[in-house]
Image: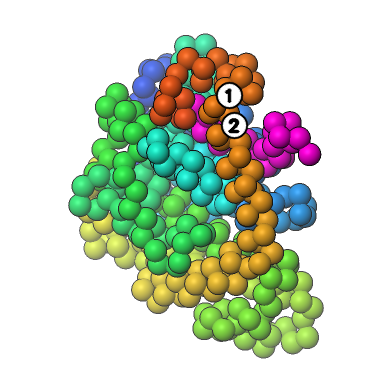
Amino acid sequence: MAVRGPLAAYASDATRSRGRLYPEAPSPTRSEFQRDRDRIIHCTAFRRLAHKTQVFVPLDGDHFRTRLTHTIEVGQIARALARALRLDEDLAEAVALAHDLGHTPFGHAGEGALEACMAPYGGFDHNAQALRVVTLLERRYARYDGLDLTWETLEGIAKHNGPLVGRDAGREHPLPHAEEPAGATSRRPLSRYIAEFDSIFPLDLSTFAGIEAQAAAQADDIAYIGHDIDDGLRAELFSLDDIARTPFIAGVLAHIRDEHPGLERGRVIHELVRRVITAFVEDSIGESLRRLARVAPASAEEARGAGEALVGLSPPMAEAERDIKRFLFENMYRHEKILGVWERARDAISRLFPAFFERPELMPAEWAAQAAALQGAERAVIVADYIAGMTDRYALGEVKRVFGG
């Protein structure tokens, strides 16, 4: 699968993109989707991911995943899926690299705290925040705010979990929120910002995203499973014997021990993680090709209108995935060591939000000026933008600066 033929009929064609909100002349050296990927990599929000928590607070260790290392892993898997399915790899990678740009500091704990603070003001959702980052909050270019990404990349960011309105809206995302029980279904109302942006630059919110974006979403799922197993084992939150209670993992470990008896623990962990990722990637390729053959979309538009996700896992592997998520929820996300850190993270954001809302002058000048001129929900959105953009270290520094100690 290292060498592929021409793009499939259902792939997105960079030469036929629906374009950008602010039209630009074509690049003589890069496709439109390559330009998107490069703009994402060079933006400020992307660099901040290096200092934002995945599950562990980075200050607790140098080798645990951050949002940035997670994002790089998602991008690699997205390209692998796109190559095998004969999709546009650059578009799949662009969506993968942008999918977490809206995440708060302190991972899911921070997001939960900011959601609670924003509940009276329309709520907070990291996918909508990612769209806000790339269309408004990045202020780098002379002619416009945002990164002016193509329609296809913006669609993939907005519809990361599937359609946002209509019959299919609110379907279960392949990986539930780390603080929700495995299998929980998130049915959030449509974000006000997405609705407003859609009125200016319609994103077809009632359809599934293009197949490249679906590949990026599946890659996100696979990367999560692999690296959370790795980080959880290395942090000794659970043991190899513990996770072997899930039948799929038990089978993988049995093969490793049969082939390499007496292998040291560190190498067993690496073998386990690489084999788990490989198994899910290969299954997703096979299952997605079966779905594509059955539906036979003749274009990217037909793929969007298929009424179902065309990238996914086979039923046996989907069940294995649910088993692993259930185990991680019970033994990692709810581990007392993690919950203790998350509680302190929640406290930090829960204190910063009302302080900045009541006294905008506590924020840096550019943010203070925006917030002071507004009231109610409009001011709350500015405060949320400021907090969501913080790294873990910066947020802790702000707590110390504002409250002392």
**Where 206 sits versus 239, above or below?**
above
Residues drawn in magenta = 382-405
Q: Residue at x 36, y 22 (%)?
A: 21
Residue 58 relative to residue 82: left or right: right
- For this rendering, which residue is in front, 236 or 255? 236
Residue 339, which numbered label?
Answer: none
Q: Is residue 273 shown left or right of residue 212?
A: right
Secondary structure at badge 1 equals loop
Residue 302 screen position, x and y as percent:
22, 46
Label ID, residue 355 = 2
Q: CA distance from mark 2 to mark 1?
A: 6 Å
- Disc 2 residue type? Ala
Q: Amino acid at mark 1?
A: Arg
Q: Residue beneath label 1, please?
A: 359
Q: Are marks 2 and 1 in contact (CB under 8 Å)?
A: yes
Looking at the image, residue 392 sits to the left or right of residue 326; the answer is right
Magenta span contains residue 389: yes
